[in-house]
């Protein structure tokens, strides 16, 4: 059985939009690139054609990946428990070492985007936060060393 993919409603919409864009615009654009590259002559020595075919393979692989993900989606409930950190909550923390407040939304790994404040429950920080309550201090073992956080608030 395939592993379930946890997504918020927004994350699901984003993946569906990406899939639709690749199926329509992406495939159309790459077909045109291939058509133009074929016009350059001998395909065995045509780098534009090879590049376009490689790009086509990447698009088709991503389409397949998205289709498989969407077959196994579990929507994260965005209502309910705010007693503990779990997937779907927004958590405000204090980075103890840098005395800086940070806000993260805990999401499934398919939706993670750390630069946008979306952290995976599978990431070092996400794992450390899971199950914590307001006032708790947690330590995340990250590649750059230990990160210490104090939970300030949990919301949906």
Image (spheres, rainbow, N blue to C red):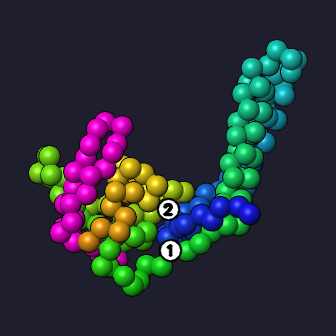
Which residue shows up at 44% across the image and 59% down it? 121
- Judge whether residue 102 can be spotted in this image: no
Q: Is residue 140 above or below residue 89?
A: above
- Judge whether residue 145 can be spotted in this image: yes
Which residue shows up at 50% across the image and 74% down it? 76
Foreground residue, 36 or 20? 20
Q: Is residue 56 above or below residue 39?
A: below
Considering the image in quadrants, where does the N terminus appear? bottom right
Circles 1 and 2: CB atoms closer than 8 Å: yes
Which residue shows up at 71% across the image and 61% down it? 2
Q: Is residue 155 magenta?
A: yes
Looking at this rendering, what residue extends furthest in the top direction?
45
| Other-residue count near label 1 (Cα within 10 Å), few / some / many at <14 / 14–19 / ≥20 | some
Assign a secondary structure to mark 1.
loop
Query: Disc 2 designates what residue?
Result: 108
**Residue 154 appears left or right of 130:** left
Q: CA distance from mark 1 to mark 2?
A: 9 Å
Q: Position of residue 130 (x, y in %)?
A: 37, 64
Instruction: Assign the magenta stretch its main secondary structure.
Output: strand
Extent of the magenta region: 134-156
| Other-residue count near label 2 (Cα within 10 Å), few / some / many at <14 / 14–19 / ≥20 | many
């Amino acid at each position: 059985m395939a592993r379930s993919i946890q997504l918020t409603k927004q994350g699901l919409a984003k993946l569906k939009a990406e899939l639709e864009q690749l199926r329509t615009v992406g495939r159309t654009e790459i077909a045109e690139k291939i058509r133009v590259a074929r016009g350059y002559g001998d395909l065995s020595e045509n780098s534009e054609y090879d590049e376009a075919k490689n790009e086509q393979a990447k698009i088709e692989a991503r389409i397949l990946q998205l289709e498989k993900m969407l077959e196994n989606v579990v929507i994260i409930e965005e209502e309910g428990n705010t007693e503990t950190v779990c997937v779907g909550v927004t958590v405000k923390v204090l980075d103890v070492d840098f005395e800086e407040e940070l806000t993260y939304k805990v999401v499934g790994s398919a939706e993670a985007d750390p630069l946008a404040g979306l952290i995976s429950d599978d990431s070092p920080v996400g794992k450390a936060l899971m199950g914590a309550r307001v006032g708790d201090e947690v330590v995340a073992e990250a590649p750059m060393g230990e990160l210490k956080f104090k939970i300030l608030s949990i919301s949906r």
